[in-house]
Amino acid sequence: MNYRHAFHAGNFADVFKHLILTRLLLYLARKATPFRYIDTHAGIGVYDLSSDEAQRTGEWRDGIGRIIAADFPADVRVLTQPYLDIVRGLNPDGGLRHYPGSPVLAAKLLRQTDRIALCELHPQDARTLRAAMRRDERVKVVEIDGYTGLNAFTPPPERRGLALIDPPFEETDEFERVLKALKVAHAKWPTGVYAIWHPFKHPDRVARFLDALVASGIRRVLSVEIQTCAFDPLGPLSGCGMTIVNPTHGLADELEIVLPALTNCLATGEGYAWRVRELVGE
Ligand SMILES: C[S@@+](CC[C@H](N)C(=O)[O-])C[C@H]1O[C@@H](n2cnc3c(N)ncnc32)[C@H](O)[C@@H]1O
């Protein structure tokens, strides 16, 4: 486990993932009945963009650094504002020093009756996460493998909810692990929303994963992708995707509004692009 998210916090991929996560959670929170948020690879909760790690890569400057200063049209602003308000809320003195990870975004968006289960296997990160989420009685932090956790936490007693699957993709078989865990969880909890983030580093692996997901028989699958410049297998990460099982109502339409402006703002070169497509229907 060498992956440290502190090097990448707030980069274009985080912005893309967290914006989609925010839209999903806001929708779930519209209905009065409680729901559960499960984060299989939770990270540390809050990232310090002035840290050595964040400064060394500077990735956040081309991610949240651009988006926070963007002048979006009104229809885009309405959809990005809840996410950006949370980022601004962590930086009450203005500027941009603290960036929320997925657990903190969820904690800000969920209600008192909702519950949050966070899995983080790295012992030090699990400790930091526990400290970041302290005093929040809705939250359970477990130092456990995320796929084991997903199995343990599904189906949640609330029967409504979302699982974010956001692994580091250090291992060559990560996509296979994701699919295996997803199939087991989905068989027990077919109505849950599952959001799976993936990097676009090995196009063949992504294609195999999506093909296998389609072949699995799981219905209602949406694929969302972003590319900030033309794909270069030898260059730094320039694209990623989020695959969503049981996407919330209206999500695809919202993303069709947001992604053109978001991608324009995050673009670093020719060949930038976005795509929203239904992989499997009802
Ligand atoms: C991409 S980061 C998570 C970022 C976080 N979801 C967010 O959006 O703020 C992946 C995290 O998974 C942790 N990790 C690595 N292997 C794991 C495993 N098998 N189970 C759970 N966590 C793991 C890493 O320590 C790292 O903190």
Image (cartoon, rainbow, N blue to C red):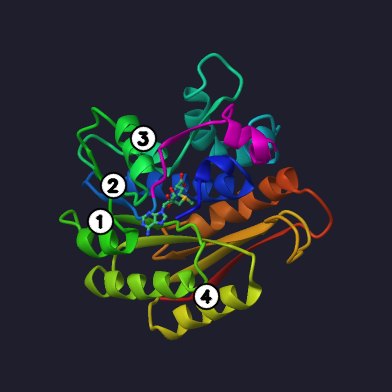
Q: Is residue 230 left or right of residue 179?
A: right
Residue 273: which quarter of the image?
bottom right
Looking at mark 1, is its residue's CB closer than 8 Å to ligand 1? no
Q: Secondary structure at mark 1?
A: loop
Amino acid type shown at disc 4: Leu
**Mark 2 vs mark 1, CA separation in Å:** 10 Å
Residues at marks 2 and 3, CA–CA distance in whole angstroms: 32 Å
Q: What amino acid is found at the position of numbered circle 2 in the picture? A: Lys
User: Label 2 vs label 4: CA separation?
Assistant: 27 Å
Say whether marks 1 and 4 touch (CB < 8 Å).
no
Q: Is residue 48 magenta?
A: yes
Q: Secondary structure at mark 4?
A: strand
Q: Is residue 201 left or right of residue 41?
A: right
Q: Are marks 2 and 1 in contact (CB under 8 Å)?
A: yes
Q: Which residue is mark 3?
A: 128
Looking at the image, residue 113 sits to the left or right of residue 236; the answer is: left
Highlighted magenta segment, given as a residue range: 42-61
Number of on-image labels: 4
In the displayed orientation, state which residue is furthest to the left: 157
Residue carrying label 1: 160
Where is residue 23 shown, x and y percent of the image?
Answer: 46, 47
Q: Is residue 120 magenta?
A: no
Q: Closer to the observer: label 2 or label 4?
A: 4
Which comes before the other along the chain, label 2 or label 3? 2
Q: Say if 71 sits above or below 160 in the image.
A: above
Q: Secondary structure at mark 2?
A: loop
Q: Residue at x 33, y 75 (%)?
A: 183
Going 84% across and 56% down the picture, which residue do you hit?
270
Separation of disc 4 and disc 3 at Cα? 37 Å
Q: Amino acid at mark 3?
A: Thr
For image coordinates 33% across by 55% down, the residue present is: 162
